[in-house]
Image (spheres, helix red, strand yellow):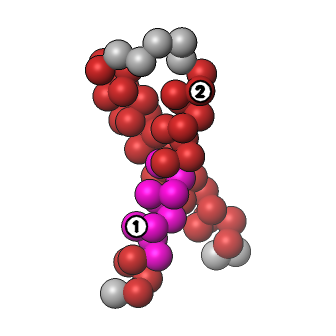
Amino acid sequence: MRATLLAVGEVLAWWAALVVLWLMLISTVYTLEWVVGACAAGVGALTARAGRRAVVRR
């Protein structure tokens, strides 16, 4: 249970950081850009977690 919470927390932290980066890079904020940014940040967060796990487990 603790490992699951840590994993979820890590993915959420990555997601939040990537959404903030996305918002800093766009000029105007429209609903569609929020959706696209949130989805792209989700993919990036999952990829970052997988990459970190691949390196740490060696």
Q: Residues within 10 Å of mark 2 (few under 14, many from 20)?
A: few
Camera-nearest residue between 23 and 48: 23
Residue 56 position within the rendered picture, expressed as x and y whole percent measured from the top left: 67, 72
Question: Is 48 one of the magenta-colored residues?
Answer: no
Q: Amino acid at mark 2?
A: Met
Q: Which residues are magenta?
A: 6-15
Picture layout, residue 26 above or below residue 6: above
Give the labeled residue for mark 2.
Answer: 24
Instruction: Decide if residue 50 is in sight here.
Output: no
Q: Quadrant of the C terminus?
A: bottom right
Residue 38 position in % (x across, y down): 38, 36
Task: Give the Cα separation between the discs numbered 2 and 1.
Answer: 24 Å
Q: Residue at x 52, y 28 (%)?
A: 23
- Residue 3 higher or lower than 34, as above or below: below
Q: Quadrant of residue 7?
A: bottom left
Residue type pointed to by label 1: Val
Q: Looking at this view, is 52 or 30 the one in front?
A: 30
Residue 13 in sight from this viewpoint: yes
Counting from the top left corner in percent of width and height, residue 51 is at 60, 56
Determine the image quadrant of residue 32: top left
Q: Earlier in the sequence, mark 2 or mark 1?
A: 1
Crowd rating for badge 1 (residues with CA inside 10 Å; few <14, some 14–19, many 20+) = some
Q: Is residue 58 left or right of residue 10?
A: right
Tell me the quadrant of the picture where the N terminus can be found: bottom left
Q: Which mark is residue 8?
A: 1
Q: Main secondary structure of the magenta part?
A: helix
